[in-house]
Image (tube, rainbow, N blue to C red):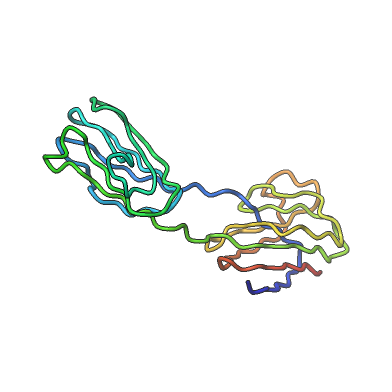
Amino acid sequence: MTRNYLLLIFSLLLTSSLWAQTSHSVEVTSNQYTPEDLTITVGDTVIWNNVQGSHNVDGRQSTYPDNPASFYSGPATTGWTFSHVFTEEGFYEYECSPHVALGMVGTITVEPAQSNTADLQIVHNSPSPTVDIWVNNEPFVTDVAFRTATEYVTVPAGVNLNVGIALAGSSSPDDIIADFDFVLDPDESYHIIANG
């Protein structure tokens, strides 16, 4: 990974929040899944919603031995919702057990997750004042003192991060005295050295 050095007037720190994966909906109706074929990413959830008829979702490895993992909604019934989180990449096939002969089948292609994070270390090299750090208008760290360095923090990459600086003891985003916008590249390491 490349090391990037950023020089700022104030101390900065970015959040290491988790990101929700994507959910995909499949409508189950009279002898069909809509959409029939999906392409998703590892960690995504597929939600099947049966709105018409007595059906099921059978993606078990006993039915499709080449599936990387099994998923199964149970025996065919009416009016149900079933969800499955796909944690392994690969090609999955599934069917409605009583209606497979009528062509009620579907596929899911699960692609590897793309990196969407960067690593960040912050060094507060400004002797005065002690500050609080806000990220996207949420408090992140308080009372950051002179010559304090963080561990590397995993932060979102490829999205806008608004980093605000407030005097120590701040209580709302209204207390921010300076803010900066960043979009970091995935799989990179950054050092932010704050001088001022």
Residue at screen point 22% across, 48% down: 36
Give the percent coordinates (x, y) of residue 163.
Answer: 66, 58
Residue at screen point 71% across, 59% down: 152
Residue 180, quarter of picture: bottom right
Residue at screen point 88% across, 64% down: 127
Q: Nearer the viewer, residue 15 or 58?
A: 58
Left/right placement of residue 177 relative to residue 65 reads right
Left/right placement of residue 13 relative to residue 78 reads right
Residue 46, quarter of picture: top left
Q: Nearer the viewer, residue 13 or 98?
A: 98
Q: Is residue 76 above or below residue 174?
A: above
Residue at screen point 39% across, 39% down: 84
Q: Nearer the viewer, residue 136 or 67?
A: 67
Give the percent coordinates (x, y) of residue 23.
Answer: 39, 45
Q: Is residue 124 above or below residue 19?
A: below
- Quadrant that contains the C terminus: bottom right
